Image: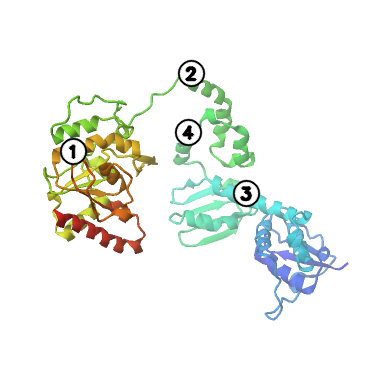
Amino acid sequence: MTLVQARLAHAADVEGFRRQARALLHAGIEPDRVAWQVEAGGDDAAADLFDACAAFRADDLPQPDAATPSVRVPAAFAQLCDAGLLHRSPQRHALLYRLLWRLRHEPGLRHDPLDPQMRQARELARAVQRDIHKMRAFVRFTALPDGRHVAWFEPAHHVVEANAGFFARRFAQMRWAILTPDRCIEWDGSRLQLRPGADRTEKPAPDAGEALWLTYYEHIFNPARLKVAAMVREMPRRYWPQLPEATLIRPLIDTAAGRAGAMVDAGATPARRFRPIVPLRAAVPQHTPRTLEELRVATDACRDCPIGAGATQAVCGSGPLQAAHMLVGEQPGDQEDLAGRPFVGPAGQLLDRALAELGWARDAIYLANAVKHFKYELRGKRRIHKTAGQREAAACLHWLEREIELVQPRSLVALGATAARALLGRPVAVQGERGRWLHERADGLPVLLTWHPSALLRLPPAQRPAAYAQWLSDLAAAREAA
């Protein structure tokens, strides 16, 4: 049987494999007739075992021209092939060329997930992908006096060149080099350079940053959460000699049980509190508030519902007594809770814009809310508004009614469904009843319904102009009626 020798420039010569494979497939060379060899310098370079018996080299075969149909394989196999070629197995080239040959002559192979050779190729690719990830995780740079940062790493497979782009993007602002026994990569701040492998003696000596890193690593090691098997699975022992912190791992594991016991014996650490403790039910004045200031003090101490315990303060209304209009919203928001004044956040800014367009002075109206405390839920460090429930609104109703008695407005404007339900004592469909004066209160005060400004802010941008115009029309009707 006549052998054809296919030579590759280096162990990670993916382009060379593609070129040779295309020529071999075009010439109809069967896999059993191909002897793959990596040029001297690769760590898995084969001996010139077939030099004497090989009739010719694959480089001597004519390359397919532009008119020749290209070899088409599934995109998934092309990716599998690129990864598998970086494996250290000396049989990887023969295996992948055999699969290329079979895909060309056995189209059904691409649909066979249990084929032994395809499974073997997938195992090679998975091992390479793991090694690519491990290199990114375990490279440790050392600072040199000349400003460069140098790292020594011993990959399990030929992944150095495949990772070069990642490190160039990650550390684009510094000059660095990664030395490995196979190939080395260097970045001068503008371009990458590849050079032959280095010797372990070129590994740089530890710098001051390494001692700082070891101190940090030792202090964040949590013996109570130690799972040795999981740690070794994520940090295989073969990488330990390349990691500075590896010298601490064994002593930390050996003392983990004692340290965990000491943590248990030490007892609980007192919880840190970031705000004063608020009693579940504070002392509420026994007499009915006679002024707005007394009302503010009473609502601030109210714990008839859980909202008050989490809010910064109660937010009562603001404006003149005996105002022609009292505008009632739903509840204070985050900014109102911090400032202690109603309608100072985004919804208040939209209300100010509407009042300015109508020529309606803000200090001529009384602004209030049906619920006096801010209800929210925490998402990270942010407080996200939550609509008050019916029980919470009912708990605040007597404060709202007392506020109306003290202010003595001539009319009420309900901004939103929560305010309308509190003022009218029944469920309200704002969209259907907005813009009309309703005379249902026992005290005879008329109530006009319209949207809350925050409802307009939540609309899609395309719907806002029309809704804003209708809302402005409702406010104009309220002003003219006074």
Q: Are marks 4 and 1 in contact (CB under 8 Å)?
A: no
Task: Identify whether 259 is placed above or below 66.
Answer: above
Q: Earlier in the sequence, mark 2 or mark 1?
A: 2
Q: Earlier in the sequence, mark 2 or mark 4?
A: 4
- Horizontal and vertical percent position of residue 310: 32, 34
What SS does tag 3 mark? helix
Label 4 crowd bin: few (<14), some (14–19), many (20+), radius 10 Å: few
**Mark number, residue 455:** none
Disc nearer the start of the sequence (3/4): 3
* Model colouring: rainbow
The structure residue drawn at horizontal position 70% and vertical position 74%, both measured from the top left corner, is 70
Report if residue 180 is visible in the image.
no
User: Mark 2: few, some, or many residues within 10 Å (few <14, many ≥20)?
Assistant: few
The answer to which quarter of the image holds residue 426 is: top left
Answer yes or no: do the residues labelled 1 and 3 have beta carbons within 8 Å? no
Q: In front: mark 2 or mark 3? A: 2
Q: Nearer the viewer, residue 46 or 82?
A: 82
**Residue 441: image x %, image y %?**
22, 43
Q: CA distance from mark 2 to mark 4?
A: 20 Å
Marked residue nearer the N-terminal end (2 or 3): 3
Asked whether the beta carbons under mark 3 and mark 4 sit within 8 Å of each other, the answer is no
How far separated are the C-alphas under marks 4 and 1?
A: 55 Å
Q: Helix, strand, or loop for circle 4?
A: helix
Q: Does the image show residue 46?
A: yes
Which amino acid is tagged 1? Answer: Glu
Residue 58 position within the rendered picture, expressed as x and y whole percent measured from the top left: 76, 70
* Residue of label 3: 130
Left or right, 331 with reference to 356: right
Q: Look at mark 4 in the image and give the residue it sits on.
A: 220
Residue indicated by mark 2: 265
